[in-house]
Amino acid sequence: MNITISSSVQMFLLQFNFYNNNLIPSFVRQEKREKVEIGMGMNGKIINDPKEGVSATNFSEQILGSGFRLCDIYWRKNQEPGRSFSSNSLYFLFMRGSSVISENLKDNSGKAQSLLYSFTKGIIWRAKAFLNPFIKDGVEVPGKQAIVLVCSGRRPLVENNQRVMVPSVGGEKILLKPKEYLDLVAA
C-alpha cells in the first residue's frame, strides 16, 4: 500500500481504531472534542480503497525520514449509536518542519515512540487513507494538505509468544502474514 507524500502535505495523522481499552497507557491524554480543528477526518479524497492485512512496520522510520516530526498523541472514546459498547481511536499527529510539540508529548516522547512502535510492529490492520485540506486555526491553508491514515481491525501476528495460525482455504492452519506493507513515498 503506497501513500505518496508531496511537499504540499503539512500534516500526517495516523489513527488506530480498536476496542481494547487496556491498549491506551495513562500518559496519553483523552481528547473530548467532537471534531479536532486541524482538518482531519474521513471526509477528504480517498487515496486508496481499504486494504486488509496491512503491516506498518516501517512507518516510524519513513515518516520521520520524510521531514515530519511527532507533535501530539491523544485518544478519543467513540460511542456508537445503538450499541452498548464503545471503540477507541488513538491518534499520532505528525507535522512537517518545526512544529510545536504538545506539552503532554514533551514529557512523554520516549513513551510515545514506544507506543507507536507497539502499534506498528507485529500487527496487521485494515487501512484506508484520505487526503484532506490542511486547516490551521480554523482556516484552510491554500495549497496545503493533510493525510489521514485510518487503521482498524487490529490483528496481532504473535500472541502468547506464539505466531498466530489461521485456517487456509484447504483447512490446514498457516501462519498469519501481512498481505501488504505500508510504504510512504516522497513525491
Image (tube, rainbow, N blue to C red):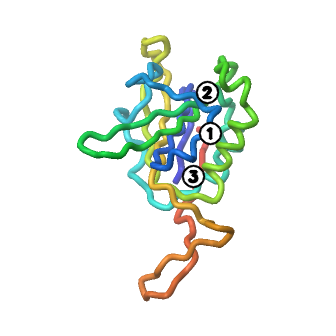
In terms of depth relative to the viewer, which is nearer, 114 or 129? 114
> What is the crowding at mark 1: few (fewer than 14 residues within 10 Å), some, or many (at least 20)?
few
Query: Which circle marks residue 106 in the picture?
Result: none
Whichever of labels 2 and 3 marks the residue nearer the N terminus, that label is 2
Which mark sits nearer the N-terminus, 2 or 1? Answer: 1
The amino acid on which the numbered mark 2 sits, given as a three-letter code, is Asp
Asked if residue 88 is positioned above or below residue 164 in the image, the reply reads above
The residue to which callout 2 is attached is 72
Near-viewer residue (92 or 61): 92
Residue, disc 1: 25
Amino acid type at image mark 3? Leu
Q: Choose mark 1 or mark 3, whichever is in front.
A: 1
Quote the CA–CA distance across marks 1 and 3: 25 Å
Residue 181 in the image: state x and y as whole percent: 58, 57
Which amino acid type is marked by label 1?
Pro
Q: Are marks 2 and 3 in contact (CB under 8 Å)?
A: no
Query: How far from the left and from the top, in percent, is residue 109?
Result: 73, 31
The Cα–Cα distance between marks 2 and 3, rounded to whole angstroms, is 21 Å
In the image, residue 149 above or below residue 170? above
SS assignment at label 3: loop
Identify which residue is drawn at 49% across, 26% down. 31
The residue sitting at the left extreme is: 82
Q: Nearer the viewer, mark 2 or mark 1?
A: 1
Q: Position of residue 99 (x, y in %)?
A: 65, 19
Rendered location of residue 155, percent (x, y)? 52, 60
Decide: few, some or many residues near mark 2? Use Cα within 10 Å; few <14, some 14-19, many ≥20: many
According to the picture, the residue beneath numbered tag 3 turns out to be 182
* Residue at x 47% of width, y 80% of height: 167
